[in-house]
Image (tube, helix red, strand yellow):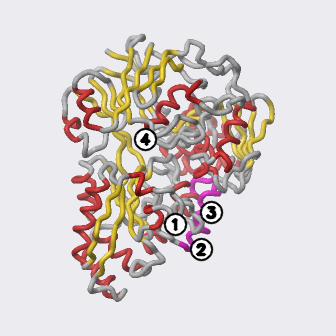
């Protein structure tokens, strides 16, 4: 298709310099169509406008997604993990709890499987010139289940609760150093400004479904959410029984298209195998998250459909940078060179993953620099590095980790691979509670171990991965990695509004982390959801959320 410069010029007239720079990148071929759509949605450009620009640039319009055409009125039955604690928007941190919260409460915007941000309770958003203030325009006519209209004061109160250190919110891992209590401002009933601590080019993801605590609930909320489950979502609570399950009914006052299902039912399970038996036996229609190894039999079951989402969820292998012999980056690189990443993907993860390159920058991120060479297994080079570091005779070290998903098997593979360079790994595999402890330095096997493997969930942008486990002041810096050059680059990346500027910083970060290797990112695994045949319109996210408003049975 040819470019239509007349339409492009008309579009440019009402766009900011930042937006026009992104358009230039698309037209000139520096930015791919996929990355243009993703980054444009981040800047607040509407999907119809992005599609129009793409078409005018000669790249074709965006495909339209048809609404599921199944019959309304079904009951959709879900197998889910048991919520680990009381369901509260401020403190919820586990998959079993957050999927229940998300059934009734909504976000300002939603991070889709393609990492494209879509409007929800906010219709639009935009940054100021420096990325220090982001302005969100709210949707009008949205009602809480309790009856009142959602307005700016509800957004301010909801986000302030999360940003207040006194509330011990799980969302502080996202907002720390970005947004303080009191920095969310009401402009009018339908406009909110977020005044940030520092420039942040990816901020809308911080108040999207990516930050699973950031649902909007009434300003009057005082706690004990399980008594009300008050939200704005397409379903309302019918019944909740702790440790057992929950059911929801269609919200006929919903602001958007009414949900197709009449009811949804969630049954809580403590383990994956009973979920699999329930799905195969017809007692449930969906397993919300299916681990690859535990659910391998379902991957080829003709009666089961697998929804596979590319995600950036991963298992971080940290190495203490302040502890001999791991203090020497040559030793850390040698260990990283022992891993056969192709075998990890094909064998351990049954092809449901992609190789990692020892930085948070997965291929899924638009800002990842794809020109940085992929690290491969190289035992000969690893031995040379060990000799150069004075560790040629090898050493013994303990690797502490958690009993979760495929992590114990991953640890065993690493144990076998590093034997080739004389490293003797003793495995200390703990249950999750013992591994994480109090999740603060001095009181956590996770944060205090010399080597450890830790699970990290999906995020639509790498900001949390760049800051919490890798920056010198990171709250999850189990590697005890302190590097001023890295800190400067991470700060620059997080501040950048422009995609090409982000990519330039990302490339430098990727190369620095390959050199230093405080953390091994061996693979990024797919998020799997299993459903019965004939079930349509189910939309999971790699954050363990499950959107069911378009679900229908054949």
Q: Position of residue 357 (x, y in %)?
A: 39, 62
Query: What residue sits 70% from the left and 49% below the top?
Result: 17
Under circle 4, the secondary element is loop
Mark 1, residue position: 442
Q: Answer with mark 3 or mark 4, whichever residue precedes in sequence.
A: 3
Mark 2, residue position: 484
Query: What residue sits 22% from the left and 35% below the top?
Result: 298
Mark 4, residue position: 542
- The image quarter containing residue 338 is bottom left
User: Which residue is nearer to you in this view: 424 or 489?
Assistant: 424
Quadrant of the rendering where the C terminus is positioned: top left
Between the C-alphas of marks 2 and 4, the distance is: 32 Å
Provide the residue span drawn in magenta: 482-501
Under circle 2, the secondary element is helix
Mark 3, residue position: 492
- Residue 287 placement, left or right of 449: left
171 part of magenta stretch: no
On the question of residue 386 being in view, the answer is: yes
């Amino acid at each position: 298709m040819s470019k239509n410069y007349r339409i492009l010029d008309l579009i440019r007239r009402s766009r900011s310099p930042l937006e026009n720079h992104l358009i230039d990148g698309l037209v000139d071929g520096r930015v791919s169509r996929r990355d243009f759509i993703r980054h444009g949605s981040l800047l607040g450009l509407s999907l119809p406008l992005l599609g129009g620009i793409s078409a005018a640039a000669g790249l074709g319009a965006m495909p339209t997604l048809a609404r599921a055409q199944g019959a309304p009125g079904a009951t959709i039955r879900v197998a889910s993990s048991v919520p680990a604690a009381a369901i509260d928007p401020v403190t919820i941190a586990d998959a079993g709890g957050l999927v229940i919260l998300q059934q009734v409460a909504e976000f300002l915007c939603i991070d889709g499987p393609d990492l494209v941000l879509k409007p929800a309770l906010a219709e639009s958003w935009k940054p100021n010139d420096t990325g220090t203030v982001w302005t969100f325009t709210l949707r009008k006519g949205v009602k809480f289940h309790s009856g009142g209209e959602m307005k700016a004061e509800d957004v301010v109160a909801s986000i302030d609760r999360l940003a207040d250190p006194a509330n011990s919110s799980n969302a502080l891992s996202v907002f720390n150093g970005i947004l303080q209590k009191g920095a969310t401002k009401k402009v009018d009933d339908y406009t909110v400004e977020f005044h940030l601590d520092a420039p942040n080019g990816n901020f809308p993801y911080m108040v999207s479904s990516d930050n699973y605590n950031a649902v909007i609930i009434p300003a009057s909320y005082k706690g004990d959410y399980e008594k009300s489950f008050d939200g704005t979502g397409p379903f309302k609570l019918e019944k909740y029984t702790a440790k057992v399950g929950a059911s929801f009914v269609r919200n006929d006052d919903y602001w958007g298209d009414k949900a197709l299902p009449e009811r949804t039912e969630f049954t809580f399970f403590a383990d994956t195998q009973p979920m699999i038996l329930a799905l195969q036996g017809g007692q449930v229609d969906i397993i919300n998250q299916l681990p690859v190894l535990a659910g391998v039999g379902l991957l080829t079951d003709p009666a089961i459909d697998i929804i596979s989402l590319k995600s950036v969820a991963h298992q971080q292998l940290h190495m203490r940078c302040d502890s001999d012999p791991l203090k020497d980056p040559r030793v850390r690189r040698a260990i990283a060179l022992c891993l056969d990443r192709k075998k990890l993907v094909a064998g351990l993860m049954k092809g449901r993953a992609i190789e990692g390159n020892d930085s948070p920058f997965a291929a899924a991120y638009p800002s990842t620099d794809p020109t940085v060479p992929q690290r491969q297994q190289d035992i000969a080079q690893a031995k040379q590095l060990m000799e150069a570091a004075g560790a040629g005779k090898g050493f013994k070290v303990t690797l502490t980790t958690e009993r979760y998903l495929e992590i114990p098997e991953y640890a065993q593979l690493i144990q076998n691979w590093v034997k080739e360079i004389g490293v003797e790994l003793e495995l200390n595999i703990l249950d999750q509670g013992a591994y994480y402890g109090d999740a603060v330095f001095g009181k956590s096997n996770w944060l205090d171990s010399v080597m450890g493997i830790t699970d990290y969930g999906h995020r639509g942008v790498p900001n949390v991965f760049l800051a919490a486990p890798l920056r010198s002041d990171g709250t999850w810096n189990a590697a005890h990695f302190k590097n001023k050059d890295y800190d400067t680059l991470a700060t620059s990346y997080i501040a950048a509004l422009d995609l090409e500027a982000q990519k330039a910083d990302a490339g430098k970060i990727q190369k620095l982390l390959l050199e230093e290797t405080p953390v091994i990112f061996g693979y990024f695994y797919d998020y799997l959801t299993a459903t019965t045949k004939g079930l349509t319109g189910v939309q999971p996210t790699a954050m363990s959320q499950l959107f069911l408003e378009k679900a229908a049975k054949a």
